[in-house]
């Protein structure tokens, strides 16, 4: 078993870190305050291959391994969680289903542009009345000759107001429940499709989460991804891989919070000493680092299993569950170490604490991850 990163993986980590430090860190506070979507920074990350890291060269990507992808997301999230969310969705939740289940025409039309970051993708599954229970979605797609008519509402769609292509899940056979869901590629500007309200969120305010409205939205039958009834399978397989990305985001955010805390523990004085000299602070820092490294171990193991083609099983769920809950514990300790400064909008850790909160919720809540892990344990 190897614990050493390969040269190209180290290079990705260093290049992305240097970019995030130089060009993103100075602007994060302002972008988050004004809910500015950092398209300019994402365009530069795209030039480094970060928008389509897992795409083969044939489709415009660098065709890299999952460990490289995870390292990139960690470095992005270490500085700005919201950008890592945008990248995770377009890389994994949108491109992978098109690559795996799309036809040649769909791949030609969208994959290269997605991989090169010319457009971003959005993944549209959640609805007002169906989140964890994805089979309960109510959006319908009714076949009419060589087209489908889509009606329904999607909520909480990341990249929803800025995407160039949307993968939309809708019921083609409502009576068949989860087996009656199909996936469609919908372009912005399609008549009957519009962006609704923006969510006013606790954190990750630079990452737009929006409602999407479909009212008699007609798409060609050739816009369907895969077969009729394959939609839930497509969505769940995208989420399996996506969970590795979310775990990477959690580890990156926690690493950022730890580094801020170490800096503060050395600089802040109380009772005539740096607070880092108090055992209470040292123990918090030690626990934070230990938990981050444990999460990183689960994360790299899941990424390794994915790349080696072996059965990934519940490994991605374990990484996502532990890393997301760990990031919340670490961010809370980071705020504690910063004292009143940690409660100020001026500090990085205040934002990290808010950004971390959603990581146990999206791409499958902690409860859903535990269901997946237990199902495998019990052989169900
Ligand atoms: C910032 C943000 C971005 C998002 N981006 C996207 C996106 O791009 N695309 C998209 O489609 N969705 C997106 N989502 C939606 C997200 O995936 C859902 O919020 C998530 O799946 C949970 O669904 P829900 O919010 O409806 O909660 P619910 O499913 O209503 O769950 C409520 C609570 O009940 C628990 N629960 C539900 N079922 C069970 C059960 N069987 N056993 C035990 N507990 C259970 C849950 O764990 C949770 O604690 C995003 C959400 C957020 C907050």
Image (cartoon, grey):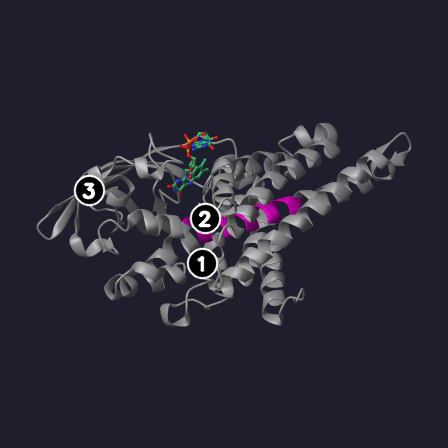
Question: Can you name the residue that lies furthest to the front here?
Answer: 379
Q: Is residue 39 visible?
A: no
Q: Which mark is residue 130?
A: none
Q: Residues within 10 Å of mark 2 (few under 14, many from 20)?
A: many
- Compared with residue 192, is residue 94 higher up or lower down, i.e. above or below? below
Helix, strand or loop status at disc 3: loop
Q: Is residue 190 left or right of residue 341?
A: left
Say whether residue 323 is magenta: no
* Residue wearing tag 3: 173
Q: Which mark is residue 51?
A: 1
Provide the secondary structure element on which disc 1 rests.
loop
Is residue 53 something that shows in the picture? yes
Q: Which residue extends farthest right?
A: 272
In the image, residue 376 sits, relative to residue 114, either above or below, namely above
Q: Dot 2 lies on which element?
A: helix
Closer to us: 87 or 39: 87
Which is in the foreground here, disc 3 or disc 1? 3
| Residue 324 occupies quadrant | top right
Q: Quadrant of the C terminus?
A: top left
Dot 3 or dot 2: first in sequence order is 2
Contact flag, marks 2 and 1 (Cβ < 8 Å): no
Residues rendered magenta in the picture: 239-256
The residue singled out by tag 2 in the image is 86
Residue 122 location in percent, x, y? 36, 48
Q: CA distance from mark 2 to mark 1?
A: 9 Å
Does the magenta stretch mainly form a helix, a strand or a loop? helix
89 vs 141, left or right, is right
Does the magenta segment cover residue 244? yes
231 left or right, relative to 295:
left
Q: Residue at x 34, y 61 (%)?
A: 100
The residue closer to the viewer here, 222 or 130, is: 130
Which one is earlier in the sequence, the residue at label 3 or at label 1?
Answer: 1
């Amino acid at each position: 078993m190897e614990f050493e990163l390969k040269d190209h993986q180290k290079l990705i980590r260093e290049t992305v870190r240097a970019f995030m430090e130089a060009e993103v860190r100075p602007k994060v506070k302002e972008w988050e305050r004004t809910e500015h979507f950092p398209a300019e920074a994402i365009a530069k990350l795209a030039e480094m291959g970060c928008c389509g890291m897992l795409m083969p060269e044939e489709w415009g990507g660098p065709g890299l391994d999952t460990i490289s992808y995870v390292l990139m997301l960690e470095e992005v999230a270490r500085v700005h969680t919201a950008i890592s969310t945008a990248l995770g969705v377009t890389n994994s939740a949108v491109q992978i289903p098109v690559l795996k289940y799309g036809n040649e025409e769909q791949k030609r039309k969208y994959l290269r542009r997605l991989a090169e970051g010319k457009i971003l993708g959005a993944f549209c599954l959640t609805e007002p009345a169906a989140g964890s229970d994805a089979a309960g979605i109510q959006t319908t797609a009714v076949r009419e000759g060589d087209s489908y008519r889509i009606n329904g509402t999607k909520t909480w769609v990341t990249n929803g107001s800025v995407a160039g292509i949307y993968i939309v899940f809708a019921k083609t056979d409502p009576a068949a429940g989860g087996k009656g869901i199909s996936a469609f590629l919908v372009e912005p500007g399609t008549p009957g499709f519009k962006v609704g309200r923006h969510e006013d969120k606790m954190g990750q305010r630079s990452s737009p989460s929006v409602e999407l409205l479909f009212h008699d939205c007609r798409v060609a039958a050739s816009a369907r991804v895969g077969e009729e009834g394959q939609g839930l399978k497509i969505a769940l397989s995208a989420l399996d891989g996506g969970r590795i990305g979310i775990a990477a985001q959690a580890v990156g955010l926690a690493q950022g919070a730890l580094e801020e805390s170490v800096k503060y523990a050395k600089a802040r004085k109380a009772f005539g000493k740096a607070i880092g000299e108090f055992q209470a602070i040292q123990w918090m820092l030690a626990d934070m680092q230990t938990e981050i490294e444990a999460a990183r171990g689960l994360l790299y193991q899941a990424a390794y299993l994915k790349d080696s083609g072996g059965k990934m099983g519940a490994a991605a769920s374990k990484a996502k569950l532990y890393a997301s809950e760990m990031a919340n514990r670490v961010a809370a300790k980071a705020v504690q170490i910063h004292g009143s400064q940690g409660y100020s909008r001026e500090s990085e850790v205040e934002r990290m604490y808010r950004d971390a909160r959603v990581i146990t919720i999206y791409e499958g809540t902690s409860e859903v991850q535990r269901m997946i892990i237990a199902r495998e344990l019990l052989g169900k």
